[in-house]
Amino acid sequence: MALKICITNRHLVENDFLDRIKEILEYGIDILILREKDLPEQEYEYLAKNVIELCSRYDTECMLHSYIKTALRLNHPYIHLTFDDFIKLSVEEKSFFRKIGVSIHSVSEAVTCCQKGASYITAGHIFETSCKPGIEPRGLDFLRNTVNSVSIPVYALGGITPANMHKCIGNGAAGVCMMSSYMKGDLYEKYSRQMLASKIGIIGQNRLRKARVLVAGAGGLGSPVLQYLAGAGIGTVGIVDKDIVSISNIHRQVIHSLDSIGMNKAESAKKYISSLNPEINVNTYPFFITKDNAEELIAQYDFIIDCVDNFETEFILNDTCVHLHKPFCYGGVIKGHGQVMTYVPGKGPCYRCIYEEPPLPGEVPTSEEAGILGPAAGVIGSIQAMEAIKYFTGAGELLTGKMMIIDLLTLNMRIAKFPKANPNCKTCSESYAQ
Ligand SMILES: [Zn+2]
């Protein structure tokens, strides 16, 4: 996640101060810098006590800004300093602090901080900022030079927006630091239309942000799935695919481009996601799912989306998800036909309840043999992404106990109902027996 740090600025000294901090922490940041300049020490101490307590509940580190004496008095070993204050720190003070952040404004200051034991630095004025109008931004070259000159994490600061975050990461920043005034609602602007939709709201949006989704296959189905999951702000996305992008993929696998030919599909998809929504954690697994690795991989995620194109893997995914009590959404597409179904533990049948065993080789044609129309994969993949969003937010109705079957050529669509698990299903009966 690109947004690692939030730095508070004075507007926070309002009645709803702690509520505002809570909102920011809800967003999920690693570090909060409590910078409330010019407050009497007692007042700052009162704020700091409350904010430190709140941060501990969210697993966020609270750095006190400048108030060294307050930090010592509260026995709180996390401080963020201006460069001048950092240089003046006594040896005793320095040995007390476990983590020291420093705001720097030149490469030489950065190098000094690194030599003198700072834990991280924030490099200021990267972009033009509305907080200090008229100050010439230092730009991405400055950021890159700073990163290349030190061995500690460098966070970009100044004029950071959801739109320019990824440029900072692309230039080596460990993350970005945003002003709390900016986070006052604006960060959610990106998801505002989605939050207006039924049952999503800020609570639903936070659930999506905390969600971990594994997408098996970054091909025809995986492309729209990943595009919409990234757009929706799913916090962590895993992509597993060993394939490399080839010219015959592009017509339907629209997450890849001609530039990605020869590249691993998981890596190529990550490249797309990082530019669409840099806040998202993306884990790539450039291998195929097998019986040996499925369990370890699936165990790390909350929802699995099956976008693979072979029956053997489909059954491995199904059996592992049922065994681990993980919900998943199956999707399949060939020519212009598609199918989708969602499995939620304890609710309705699994994939094996319906298909029982993989077909014999040659019995059902593959997409290589029968062909596939790009938009058909687009429709089915979009429904799979929608199922994940519905699962996490509670909006609408899931395709559990139901399989949607559609022919995009005739637009005939039906929903086949399978209200109960198949009593002869090997997977469910084994799983239920446990
Ligand atoms: Zn079953």
Image (cartoon, helix red, strand yellow):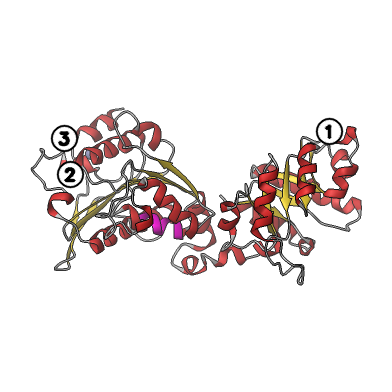
**In the rendered structure, which segment of residues is drawn in magenta?**
225-231
Residue 7: assigned label: none
Q: Is residue 121 above or below residue 252?
A: above
Q: Earlier in the sequence, mark 3 or mark 2?
A: 2
Q: Which residue is mark 3?
A: 424
Q: Is residue 192 magenta?
A: no
Q: Which residue is mark 2?
A: 354
Marks 1 and 2 in Cβ contact (< 8 Å): no
Assign a secondary structure to mark 3. Answer: loop
Q: Which residue is mark 1?
A: 96
Q: Number of marks in the image?
A: 3
- In the rendered structure, the answer to whether residue 338 lies left or right of residue 68 reads left
Assign a secondary structure to mark 2. Answer: helix
Give the alpha-carbon distance from disc 3 to disc 1, as whole Å: 65 Å
Q: Earlier in the sequence, mark 1 or mark 2?
A: 1
Mark closer to the observer (3, 1): 1
